[in-house]
Image: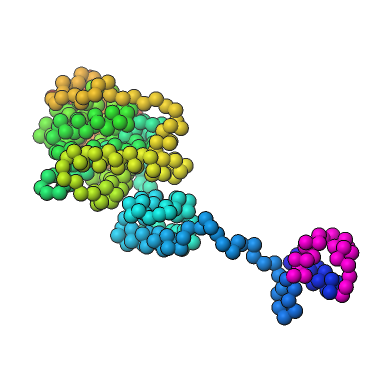
Amino acid sequence: MDSKRKRERRMAVQRFFKGEEPQAICASMGRSRSWLYKWVTRYTATDPAWCEEASRRPLTSPHRTPAEVEEFVELVRLSLYNKGLFCGDQAIAWELDDLGVRPMPSLSTLGRILRRRKLTHRRTARYEPKGTVYPTLPALRPNQTHQVDLVGPCYLAGPLRFFSLNAIDVRLNRCGVEPIPSRAAQSILDAIWAVWTRLGMPDHLQVDNEMSFFGSPIHPRGMGPLIRLCLHVGVALWFTPPAEPWRNGVIEKFNDHYRQKFLGRVTRASMPELQAGSLAYEHRHHSTYRYSKLQGDTPLSALAGTGRPLVFPPQAEAPRYPLAKPEAGCYHLVRFIRSDLQVHIFSELFSAPAATQYESVVATIDVAAQKLKLFLDKRQVAEYDYRLR
């Protein structure tokens, strides 16, 4: 097709220079006068490629990102990558904003820059599940499941030590960041309550086996403050298997972001300054950080798009410790059964059926019935007396 067009252009120019009328040339070839004059103008006797199609790319791109900004993007990306930090377009945008780079490229522009400069290499491949099925919690709507974890101890300027109770709505990645002075029972209750007043209360709350969450290994049946709080307000509390932090993967990844983008950047001299900075970081995350699982939306935009009402705590102040002993409700522990066929319920051991070997089971503690029930694939396989104290 290209060779036919080239012959047509040569023939038209030859006829023109032989003195044939432009109108006759255009009529016989079905072309316009502007087409003919275009190729007559481009004709160069010493250049055999004069009849080739020229690039239509504009000579200037007034809206193109300046070269110095692209260089800065590359330097920031390589710096983050070499430090083992998040280095995608979101992390780069956050870094550029902190550094005051202007004009600030959009996320799509950052993606194009990274692709142009071949800077899209992933540090590791995606995780591929191996082994048995793990009983995951549903996360199909806002506040259906929250994951919670403690970060710390961390330190302010000087000897002041603090912890941060971080929570995340697994469906929309809305976060709650609440600094506390210690892991004392009332501090945990105050932090959870404060997060719920901002995010709303979840149906399910998933935590690890941090002692502050379950109580005391000396009194494993005493129902610690968080267990009692969840039972009183109707939130289903779930404990992940010990020493398996990836089961709380969403909050663990958020914790990395929190350490890199907040703890690693700020210097606070007091708890009030830390609390104000934590709220500002939380708002910035909600309003600017975009997630592919939300189709590029921010958590706030995604929440507005659902149109679902949220349920908030019934009072402004957190309940005071000690809480009354609940009389009903259930809380759950996910446990992996190894070759010894033992179920670890905090500091106690129970014998499991042979069918559960090398399987993940759900141990449900029924407060009203005073029973410990073992479930495999939602089927009850064992039951034990479990007198709560």
Q: Is residue 310 above or below residue 100?
A: above
- Residue 240 seen in the figure: no
Magenta stretch: dominant secondary structure: helix
Magenta stretch in the rendered image:
18-41
User: What's the residue at 73%, 76% (across, down)?
Assistant: 44
Query: In x, y percent, where is residue 374?
Result: 27, 31
From the viewer's perspective, tell me whether residue 46 is left or right of residue 269: right
Q: Is residue 34 magenta?
A: yes
Q: Is residue 286 above or below residue 311?
A: below
Query: In x, y percent, where is residue 312?
Result: 31, 25
Q: Quadrant of the N terminus?
A: bottom right
Query: Hey, which quadrant is residue 34 in on the image?
Result: bottom right
Q: Nearer the viewer, residue 93 or 386?
A: 93
Q: Nearer the viewer, residue 141 or 10?
A: 10
Q: Is residue 309 above or below residue 48?
A: above
Q: Quadrant of the C terminus?
A: top left
- Residue 156 seen in the figure: yes
Q: Is residue 379 magenta?
A: no
Q: Nearer the viewer, residue 11 or 149?
A: 11
User: What's the residue at 41%, 40% (across, down)?
Assistant: 298
Q: Is residue 65 above or below residue 129?
A: below
Query: In x, y percent, where is residue 332?
Result: 26, 31
- How many numbered marks, from 0 up? 0
User: What's the residue at 34%, 33% (across, down)?
Assistant: 145
User: What's the residue at 37%, 62% (across, down)?
Assistant: 75
Colour logic: rainbow
Query: Hey, which quadrant is residue 22 in on the image?
Result: bottom right
Query: In x, y percent, where is residue 243?
Result: 23, 45
